[in-house]
Amino acid sequence: MAEYFLDIEYNDITYQEEEVNFKEFECCTFTNCNFSQCAFVAVTFIDCIFNDCTFSNAKINYVAFRTVTFNRCEIKDVNFAMCDKLIFEITFNNCILDFSKFYTLKMKGTSFTNCSIIAVDFMSTDLTEVIFDNCDLYRSEFAKAIANKADFKTSYNYTIDPKTTKLKKAVFALEGLKGLLYKHEIIVQ
């Protein structure tokens, strides 16, 4: 049975590979913690906040994120695709998510604000009503994604093929049209 931790603040901790395994954290705050060496097994975060934490290269295959907020975190090359899909609710503010994977996840209503999202895998992901607010989406992949009602209007460097991505009622700025037309070799000036 998992150990349960409620309403605790964790500061300046570097976690070892198995240190958080088989634990459930609820209403906890992690500040300036490093999880990059972790290989998570049976870990649950409920209503938790991560401030200035590092997750780069962490193995989070068996993690549940239920209403979790990441602020100013480095989350490079992390595969979220194998996370627990039941109540997967996350928010990212001022984070670096480069080379991470969200393949096939249901992320309806997720908010990405001021994030670096370079070469991220959103293939076959449900991005319905997702907000990409001032995010760099350079080389991120959206093939077979559902991005209906998604908001891209303040983001940049995206290339999305409307033939392979559902974009009904998605919002784009006029400056971002070239990212939708790149495949057709149409020049927008």
Image (cartoon, grey):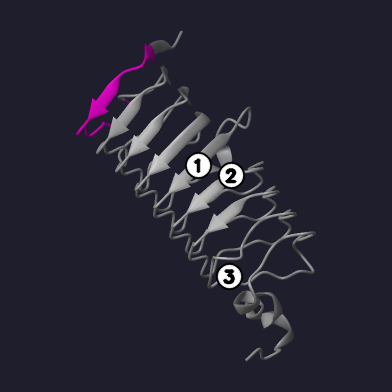
* Residues packed near mark 2 inside 10 Å, few (<14), some (14 to 19) or many (20 plus): some
Q: Can residue 59 be seen?
A: no
Residue 110 sits in which quadrant?
top right
CB-based contact (under 8 Å), mark 1 and mark 2: yes
Identify the residue at horizontal 53%, vertical 73% (top origin). 157
Q: How many marks?
A: 3
Q: Nearer the viewer, mark 3 or mark 2?
A: 2
Q: How many angstroms separate mark 3 from mark 2 (CA)?
A: 18 Å
Which residue is the site of mark 3?
Answer: 158
* Position in image of residue 87 (x %, y %): 62, 28
Q: Amino acid at mark 2?
A: Thr
Q: Can residue 182 be seen?
A: yes
Q: How many angstroms separate mark 3 from mark 1 (CA)?
A: 20 Å
Q: How many angstroms separate mark 1 from mark 2 (CA)?
A: 6 Å
Earlier sequence position, callout 1 versus callout 2: 1
Q: Amino acid at mark 1?
A: Thr
Earlier sequence position, callout 3 versus callout 2: 2
Which residue is the site of mark 2?
Answer: 110
* Position in image of residue 116 (x %, y %): 43, 60
Identify the residue at horizontal 43%, vertical 48% (top origin). 93
Which portion, as a residue range, is magenta? 5-18
Which residue is the site of mark 1?
Answer: 91
Earlier sequence position, callout 3 versus callout 1: 1
